[in-house]
Amino acid sequence: MSRGGATGKTWPILNKLLRNTGLPFDYEFIQALGQGIALSREAVEKGYNLVIAVGGDGTVNEVVNGLIDEKGKGRATLGIIAAGTQNDTAHMLGIPRDYLRACQLFENFEKVNIDIGAVEYTHHNEIRSRYYINTAGIGFVSDVIEGSIPYSRFKVIGGSMPYAIGVIPKVLDYHNKDVLICIDGEKREERDFSIVVNNGRYLGGGRVFPDATPCDGLLDVAVIGNISKLEAVLKSPLFFTGTYVDHQKFKVQKAKIVIIDSPQRLPIQLDGELVGYTPAVFRIMPAVLEVATRGLQSQMKAQRETTQGTA
């Protein structure tokens, strides 16, 4: 059902492209929310050493959660064919968006170990845990996802349209949240518009953290402070292009552990899907998952050199 059902219709083409690479494989369709986790675990138990997620960020998230064991270690290589709405995770990992090139990657790919985010959160008064590969957050970023659900039919178009449509009513009705946030042991109580806790660069198609890398053993945290609705509208382009760092109401830093609580139950988004509510604890798990990609190592090296040169 990813990308408004377009992925299912595209599968016969993808199937043929993959067969043409000579890659021997079996496949399963995810029939219900969460089933991707079970299918990935089953694949690992059957001895498959490469598990490819065909879909969007939500599909990839489920597969990731099936590939990591109870000790927090990856048990197989993750592959991705980006066929969703945003495909932020694939973009982060340098996976081609073109179907032909994405399938041809599996003829000759490199394996890179990347970091994964881990979250403990509340769901139906129970404490649960889940992994994420690219983005997490609370506040407005979660409310937008909730607001875009009625417009999911537009996902077939791809890109940011379903979320952009969801922004309009949400920003008019939105109220900033009172939070208690603790970043690597530093506590503060404040009123914020939104908090983003990323492992990668992207959120909703925007390059929110231009210098983020999933290979540095750190989370990238952006706290958008007590801004007004007008500021939210006017400053959103800064946020989604990563040019907000000098704005006085935007705080950006790297961290290993982030704890967020609130007098309200604030929804949490992981890789574009709502999973539960605060209180929540976000942690980084360095180099635990092996991914199939091409050129990511050189990309990360160039990025680190550019960042160090700027510093």
Image: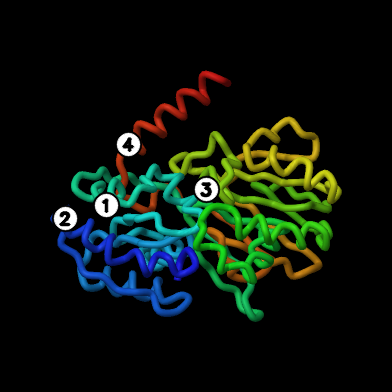
User: Cβ–Cβ below 8 Å for labels 3 and 1?
Assistant: no
N-term-proximal mark, 3 vs 1: 1
- The kind of secondary structure element at disc 1 is helix
N-term-proximal mark, 1 vs 2: 2
On the picture, is 159 further left or further right than 141?
A: left
Mark 3 residue type: Asn
Q: How far, Cα to Cα, is label 4 from label 2?
A: 22 Å
Residue 298 placed where, x, y %? 35, 31
Nearer mark to the viewer, of 3 and 2: 2
Q: Residue furthest top?
A: 309
Q: Indicate which disc residue 295 carries.
A: 4
Q: How far, Cα to Cα, is label 4 from label 3?
A: 19 Å
- The kind of secondary structure element at disc 3 is loop
Nearer mark to the viewer, of 4 and 2: 2
Residue 146 placed where, x, y %? 66, 67
Mark 2 residue type: Asn
On the picture, is 191 further left or further right than 30?
A: right
User: Cβ–Cβ below 8 Å for labels 1 and 2?
Assistant: yes
Q: Indicate which disc residue 26 carries.
A: none
Q: Which residue is mark 2?
A: 20
